[in-house]
Image (cartoon, rainbow, N blue to C red):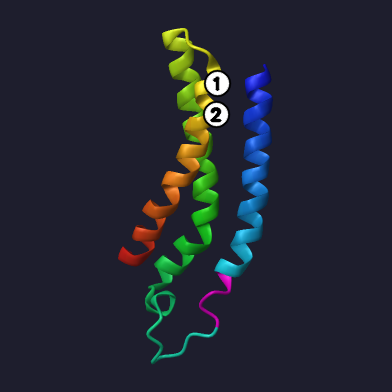
């Protein structure tokens, strides 16, 4: 039961960070004009949308990592503490993957 509480707190913290990060990412392309060469100005419309969704995808990755860690711990009869670092790892791994995806779509 305590693992669910820890994961819920981490998910809430990640959601708060995602909400805060979503706002500047949504406005990152506002100063872009036709001849700008910054990477964010070169994104397609889908890439810009993915850039805004990136913090929320990271929260989902963290939640998936925590769930996978808890399932692995239950299956192997380990301590469920393995789910916490896997949640953080899942959160951090999604960011560079999402960054690359924003450049490619």
Q: Are marks 2 and 1 in contact (CB under 8 Å)?
A: yes
Q: Is residue 78 left or right of residue 5?
A: left
Residue 73 image point, x, y percent: 47, 15
Determine which residue is flagged by label 1: 81
Residue 40 image point, x, y percent: 43, 75
Task: Report the disc number at residue 84.
Answer: 2
Q: Residue at x 50, y 43 (%)?
A: 91
Is the C terminus in the top left, top right, bottom left or bottom right quadrant?
A: bottom left
Q: Is residue 83 above or below residue 25?
A: above
Residue span colored magenta: 26-30
Classed neighbour count for the residue bearing mark 1: other residues with Cα under 10 Å, few (<14), some (14–19), many (≥20): some
Q: Secondary structure at mark 1?
A: helix
Q: Secondary structure at mark 2?
A: helix
Residue 34 image point, x, y percent: 41, 91
> Marks 2 and 1, how far apart in space?
6 Å
**Looking at the magenta stretch, what is its main secondary structure?**
loop
């Amino acid at each position: 039961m305590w693992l669910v509480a820890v994961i819920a707190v981490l998910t809430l913290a990640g959601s708060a960070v995602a909400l805060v990060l979503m706002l500047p990412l949504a406005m990152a392309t506002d100063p872009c004009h036709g001849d700008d060469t910054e990477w964010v100005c070169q994104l397609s419309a889908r890439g810009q949308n993915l850039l805004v969704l990136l913090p929320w995808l990271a929260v989902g990755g963290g939640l998936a990592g925590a769930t996978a860690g808890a399932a692995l711990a239950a299956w192997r009869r380990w301590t469920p503490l393995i789910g916490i670092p896997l949640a953080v790892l899942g959160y951090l791994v999604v960011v560079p993957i999402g960054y690359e995806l924003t450049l490619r779509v």
